[in-house]
């Protein structure tokens, strides 16, 4: 099977890659050593390169509509949301909802 030069990957050095990803070269070095992110790289002798296609894939894999929560929402944030819901749906309508903790607190 013939290899076409068109298939030859576009290789970026760390400087070029860092500019594309808007990070520093130090950050890229850290990613390589910690494997924190799955950004593939090419080792050619003592030099490091990135395949442009891999960088694009990396960006695509990290594109989402929301950030991944790194921890569970705090109890406080949960209660704040609950209080807002209780205020809006129960207090303002004079409803006591048996499933609502805040309604139960008031009625007891
Ligand atoms: Zn309520």
Image (cartoon, rainbow, N blue to C red):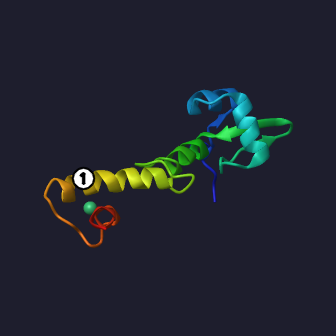
Is 38 in front, or is 96?
96
Q: Is mark 1 within 8 Å of ligand 1?
A: no
Tell me how many marks there are: 1
Left or right, 1 with respect to 98, comes to right
Q: Quadrant of the N terminus?
A: bottom right
Query: Could you say which is closer to the camera, residue 78 or residue 31?
Result: 78
Residue at the front extreme, as displayed:
108
Q: Is residue 108 above or below residue 92?
A: below
Q: Which residue is mark 1?
A: 87
Nearer to us in this view, 22 or 41: 22
Q: Quadrant of residue 48?
A: top right
Of all residues shown, which one is farthest toward the bottom? 98
Q: Quick check: 76 left or right of 26?
A: left
Q: What percent of the width, then of the height, locates residue 90? A: 20, 59
Position of residue 42 relative to residue 22, above or below, is below
Location of residue 22 in the rendering, given as x and y in whole percent from the top left corner: 58, 29
Picture coordinates of residue 61 (x, y %)? 52, 51
Which image quadrant: the C terminus?
bottom left
Instruction: Please name the residue shown 53% across and 44% down the image.
Output: 59
User: Helix, strand or loop at disc 1?
Assistant: helix
Q: Is residue 59 left or right of residue 49?
A: left
For image coordinates 67% across by 39% down, the residue present is 50
Label 1 crowd (10 A; few <14 / some 14-19 / many >=20): some
Q: Residue at 62% of width from left, 42% of height from top?
A: 9
Query: Where is residue 16 drawn, in percent x and y?
Result: 64, 28
Above or below, comparing residue 97 to residue 2 in the picture: below
What residue do we see at 30% from left, 72% from top? 99
In this view, the residue in front, 24 or 43, is 24
Q: Is residue 8 left or right of residue 81?
A: right
């Amino acid at each position: 099977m013939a290899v076409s030069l068109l298939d030859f990957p576009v290789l970026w050095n760390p400087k070029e890659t860092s500019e594309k990803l808007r990070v520093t070269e130090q950050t890229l070095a850290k990613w390589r050593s910690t494997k924190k992110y799955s950004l593939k790289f090419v080792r050619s002798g003592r030099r490091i390169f990135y395949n442009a296609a891999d960088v694009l894939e990396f960006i695509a894999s990290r594109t989402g509509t929301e950030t991944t929560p790194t921890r569970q929402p705090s109890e406080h944030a949960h209660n704040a949301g609950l209080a807002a819901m209780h205020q809006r749906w129960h207090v303002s309508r004079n409803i006591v909802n048996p499933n609502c903790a805040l309604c139960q607190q008031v009625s007891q």
